[in-house]
Amino acid sequence: MIHHSSDLDAFDRKILDIVAIEGRISVTELSRRIGLSKSPTQARLKRLEETGLIRGYRALFDPIRLGRDHVAFVEVKLTDTRESALAEFNAAVIRVPEIEQCHLIAGQFDYLLKVRTASMSAYRLVLAEKISTLPYLANTSTYVAMQAVKEEGVGPVATGG
């Protein structure tokens, strides 16, 4: 059983590197690329899944082509940071689909949210109707992203002009 990254050997690391980018790769192709036969490759892949190192596979969508290219980062300060308040805030955040990421932060504010919408006006509505109604919210500060230089599943967007 794998408990720490130090328990991984070179083959396991190669498998993780490849499936992180090509989740739909066949076991035959994966085994060829890492230099092991199919059966041990399949066993290693299964072990990585069963131990939770590989948590699943999913499709990555292009948010720009889906019309959701407005990204805002929101600093959130809470009125209460006891565990019960954090748990209630966390549960509420999970129910807001426009909040793509939420991180508890050690610093000048409590949370950092990544919010993705179609436009500034759509973001303003999400801020007013959803984010501003989150439990224990004291205040927010919004920072609008001008360009995604590096983002999982999204390459840089060339702009004309």
Image (cartoon, helix red, strand yellow):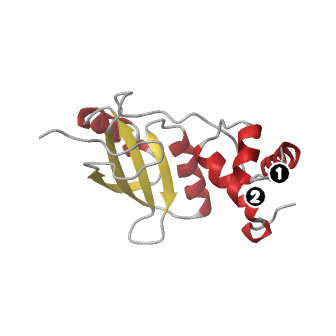
Q: Classify 10 Å Cα crowding around label 2: few (below 14), some (14-19), many (20 and above).
A: some
Question: Dots 2 and 1: beta carbons under 8 Å?
Answer: yes
Q: Which residue is mark 1?
A: 44
Instruction: State whether residue 37 is above or below residue 12.
Output: above
Along the viewing direction, whichever of 80 and 143 lies nearer the viewer: 143
Q: Which residue is mark 2?
A: 12
Rendering coords of residue 96 (x, y %):
48, 37
Q: Quadrant of the N terminus?
A: bottom right
Q: Earlier in the sequence, mark 2 or mark 1?
A: 2
Residue type beneath disc 2? Asp
Query: Is 132 on the left or on the right of 82, as rendered?
Result: left
Question: SS class of the residue under badge 2?
Answer: helix
Instruction: State whether residue 9 is above or below residue 90.
Output: below
Residue type beneath disc 1? Arg
As measured in the structure, the alpha-carbon distance from the residue carrying label 2 to the one carrying label 1 is: 7 Å
Rendering coords of residue 97 (x, y %):
48, 35
Rendering coords of residue 135 (x, y %):
48, 49
Query: Is 145 on the left or on the right of 137, as rendered?
Result: left
